[in-house]
Image (tube, rainbow, N blue to C red):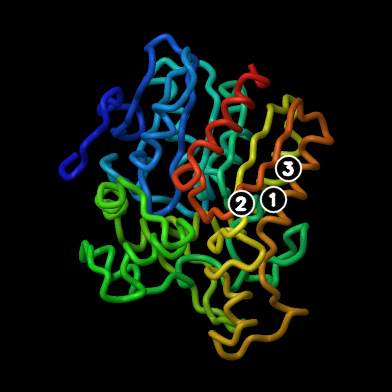
């Protein structure tokens, strides 16, 4: 992990599974209760190190770099399977590391991976934790609390919706601050509430820049559409895998799960990535006049991501969930576990105690 200084108490290792060779960070006692941390897009396991070290005594923290990220073996992402490539990868990691059951914590895209894991591998889950998770209906292209598609072809979601300048700068390993689209400036503007800058900022940037770029990775390919904004999901890569076209069946399957686990959800009140007015959503950008040709709020309103998540989580709890908590962390952006660690850790540790 060149350019990364791991804090004392966190170990780095490679774990060969039946699907791919994982890079994994661990901390805590070998025989501790496992807590598995899943990172989001443009990030990596390293973003969890301080959260890992803060866990109460008796817990073992495990944070993998997921497929397409960090130092894990790069294998293509079949977006037509939704989150299943990542879910199956995680199950293989559980098997390789001898993990029978674990508490899961997913940040942003990592939350989407948990939705699928809960459906396919519920026997391995003690509880599900979420930090600013992507909507259960996917990112982009839906409206209303129940995630109705704006168009039949899910236009406005998928790999074609990502800013190409941001992608170019990741590919070129850009560490500058000379443009609003530079990776570092995007992190500063959206992961946290300015002027907050984390102590590990440069290490976070190093880890995030390991993200693999391409049609089968980030952001993925796209399909032209006759519907505004003229792009629909392709078949490969990260952003297509989380598009509603491929995850639309996850919500009914999640709600139908017979053995429901405790849910923990924390999100920043100023999150502009996953929010009801996300600055990364074409509905919001069209409404604000940043993208021409917007067809109006009746056809393509801003996706109410938080409202959608709340509706699904509350229904999950009503249908047999054992414990459900939602926490809004004030004056925090997309990374409240980094920006407000004391508040986040206190809330999550209390939840773990109740979920035991």
Please report whichever mark, 2 or 3, sits nearer to the chain's N-terminal start: 3
Position in image of residue 14 (x %, y %): 25, 29
Residue at x 42% of width, y 61% of height = 195
Cα distance in 3D space between marks 2 and 1: 18 Å
Residue annotated with mark 1: 309
Please report whichever mark, 2 or 1, sits nearer to the chain's N-terminal start: 1
Q: Count residues near mark 3 (Cα–Cα under 10 Å), then give few for <14, some for 14-19, many for 20+.
A: many
Q: If the image is split into quadrants, where does the C terminus sit? A: top right
| Nearest-to-viewer mark from 2 and 1 | 2
Cα distance in 3D space between marks 3 and 1: 6 Å
The answer to whether mark 3 and mark 1 are in CB contact below 8 A is yes
Residue annotated with mark 3: 313
Numbered disc 1: secondary structure: helix
Position in image of residue 44 (x %, y %): 36, 44
Residue at x 49% of width, y 59% of height = 193
Q: If the image is split into quadrants, where does the N terminus sit? A: top left
Residue annotated with mark 2: 330
Cα distance in 3D space between marks 2 and 3: 21 Å
The answer to whether mark 2 and mark 3 are in CB contact below 8 A is no
> 326 or 169, which lies in front?
326
Position in image of residue 261 (x %, y %): 69, 27
Position in image of residue 22 (x %, y %): 31, 33
Quarter of image, res 326? top right
């Amino acid at each position: 992990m060149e350019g990364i200084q791991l804090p004392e108490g966190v170990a780095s290792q490679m774990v060969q599974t039946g699907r791919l060779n994982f890079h994994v960070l661990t901390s805590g006692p070998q025989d501790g209760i496992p807590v598995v941390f899943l990172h989001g897009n443009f990030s990596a396991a390293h973003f969890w190190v301080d959260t890992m070290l803060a866990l109460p005594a008796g817990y073992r923290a495990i944070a993998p770099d997921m497929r397409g990220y960090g130092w894990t073996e790069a294998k293509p992402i079949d977006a037509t399977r939704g989150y299943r490539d990542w879910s199956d990868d995680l199950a293989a990691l559980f098997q390789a590391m001898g993990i029978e059951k674990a508490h899961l914590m997913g940040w942003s895209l990592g939350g989407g991976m948990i939705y699928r894991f809960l459906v396919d591998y519920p026997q391995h889950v003690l509880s599900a934790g979420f930090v600013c998770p992507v909507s259960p209906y996917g990112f982009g292209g839906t409206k209303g609390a129940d995630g109705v598609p704006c168009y039949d072809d899910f236009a406005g979601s998928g790999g074609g919706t990502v800013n190409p300048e941001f992608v170019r700068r990741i590919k070129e390993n850009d560490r500058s601050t000379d443009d609003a689209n530079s990776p570092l400036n995007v992190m500063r503007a959206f992961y946290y509430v300015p002027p907050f800058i984390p102590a590990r900022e440069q290490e976070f940037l190093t880890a995030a820049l390991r993200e693999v770029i391409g049609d089968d990775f980030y952001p993925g390919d796209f399909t032209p559409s006759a519907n505004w904004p003229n792009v629909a999901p392709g078949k490969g890569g990260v952003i297509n895998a989380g598009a509603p076209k491929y995850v639309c069946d996850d919500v009914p399957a999640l709600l139908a799960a017979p053995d429901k686990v405790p849910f923990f959800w924390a999100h920043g009140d100023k999150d502009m990535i996953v929010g009801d007015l996300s600055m990364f959503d074409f509905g919001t950008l069209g409404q604000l006049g940043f993208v021409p040709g917007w067809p109006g709020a009746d056809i393509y309103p801003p996706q109410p991501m938080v409202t959608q998540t709340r509706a699904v989580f509350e229904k999950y709890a009503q249908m047999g969930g054992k414990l459900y908590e939602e926490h809004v962390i004030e004056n925090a952006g997309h990374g409240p576990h980094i920006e407000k660690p004391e508040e986040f850790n206190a809330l999550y540790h209390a939840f773990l105690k109740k979920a035991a």
